[in-house]
Image (cartoon, rainbow, N blue to C red):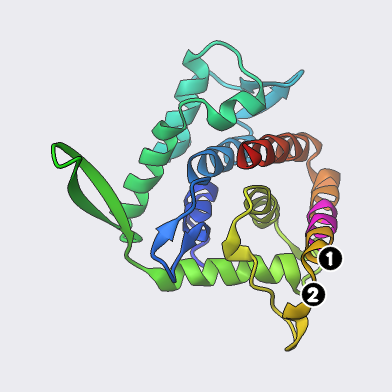
């Protein structure tokens, strides 16, 4: 994917951005949190202990402010299952991701006053072409001819989590003209089959990682439904 140096939570934030409306969906806070959890599992800094998200090393750091902030939060909190971390204190991770993307020039901070009184900060997309390129790559993985065996764990996780969150930015399909006529039920079944294919392929390479991804997908879907 383009801009591969971006962390998974940062990329998920950009993929969630509807460039036609210059806005993000309401599911962004739990989405970026799940992305950060998956990234920490990928790096071997979080593991699954009978369903509990457990730090592997009490002193390790990644050098990424978003990931290190979440890792510190997990260390200092009482034990929680993966599903709990999808919604617990998500604002901490969201703010850190936005600060990181703003520093990198991907977002633009805009100060305003809530209710005309309280100072707050909104963010605008500063580099829509990057978000659109990430979205197109994700759509190619989800709808296109890319073989599951050719998809990296990080890209597969991005697509799995983004679809669980119901991101409409992945809805536009690639393919020949007329493909858009497929009915919604057929699309939903096709998406689920493709995501399961990605998860099963990933589980062969990293059973713990993909067990966590599957659990987080379920929690994300429940949050989206609520």
- Image spot of residue 165 (x, y percent): 62, 48
- Image spot of residue 186 (x, y percent): 84, 65
Circle 1 residues within 10 Å: few <14, some 14–19, many ≥20: few
Give the extent of the magenta segment: 190-197
- Image spot of residue 98 (x, y percent): 36, 47
Asked if labels 1 and 2 touch by Cβ distance under 8 angstroms, the answer is: yes
Residue 171 horizontal side relative to residue 205, left or right = left
Relative to 1, say whether 53 is above or below: above
Circle 2 residues within 10 Å: few <14, some 14–19, many ≥20: few
Measured in 3D between alpha carbons, the distance from the residue under mark 2 to the one under mark 1, in whole angstroms, is 7 Å
Which residue is disc 1 drawn over? 186
The disc at residue 61 is none
The disc at residue 182 is 2
Residue 20 horizontal side relative to residue 201, left or right = left
Relative to 85, say whether 193 is above or below: below
At 77% from the left and 34% from the top, the residue drawn is 208
Please identify the quadrant where the N terminus is shown: bottom right
Dominant SS in magenta = helix
* Quadrant of res 169: bottom right
- Image spot of residue 115 (x, y percent): 20, 40
Which element carries disc 2, helix, strand or loop?
Answer: loop
Q: Is residue 177 magenta?
A: no
Which element carries disc 1, helix, strand or loop?
Answer: helix
Relative to 77, say whether 110 is above or below: below
């Amino acid at each position: 994917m383009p801009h591969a140096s971006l962390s998974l939570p940062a990329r998920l934030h950009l993929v969630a951005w509807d460039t036609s409306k210059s806005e993000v969906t309401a599911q962004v806070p739990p989405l970026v949190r799940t992305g950060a959890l998956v990234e920490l599992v990928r790096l071997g800094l979080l593991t699954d202990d009978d369903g509990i998200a457990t730090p592997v090393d009490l002193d390790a750091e990644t050098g990424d402010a978003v990931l290190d902030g979440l890792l510190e939060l997990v260390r200092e909190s009482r034990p929680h299952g993966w599903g709990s971390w999808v919604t617990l204190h998500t604002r901490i991770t969201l703010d850190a991701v936005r600060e990181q993307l703003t520093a990198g020039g991907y977002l633009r901070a805009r100060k305003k006053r809530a209710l005309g009184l309280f100072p707050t900060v909104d963010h605008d997309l500063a580099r829509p072409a990057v978000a659109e390129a990430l979205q197109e790559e994700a759509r190619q993985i989800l709808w296109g001819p890319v073989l599951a065996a050719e998809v990296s764990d990080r890209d597969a996780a991005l697509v799995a989590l983004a679809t669980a969150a119901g991101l409409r930015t992945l809805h536009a399909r690639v393919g020949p003209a007329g493909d858009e006529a497929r009915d919604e039920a057929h699309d939903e079944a096709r998406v689920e089959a493709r995501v399961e294919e990605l998860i099963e392929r990933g589980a062969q390479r990293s059973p713990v990682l993909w067990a966590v991804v599957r659990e987080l997908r379920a929690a994300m879907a429940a949050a989206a439904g609520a």
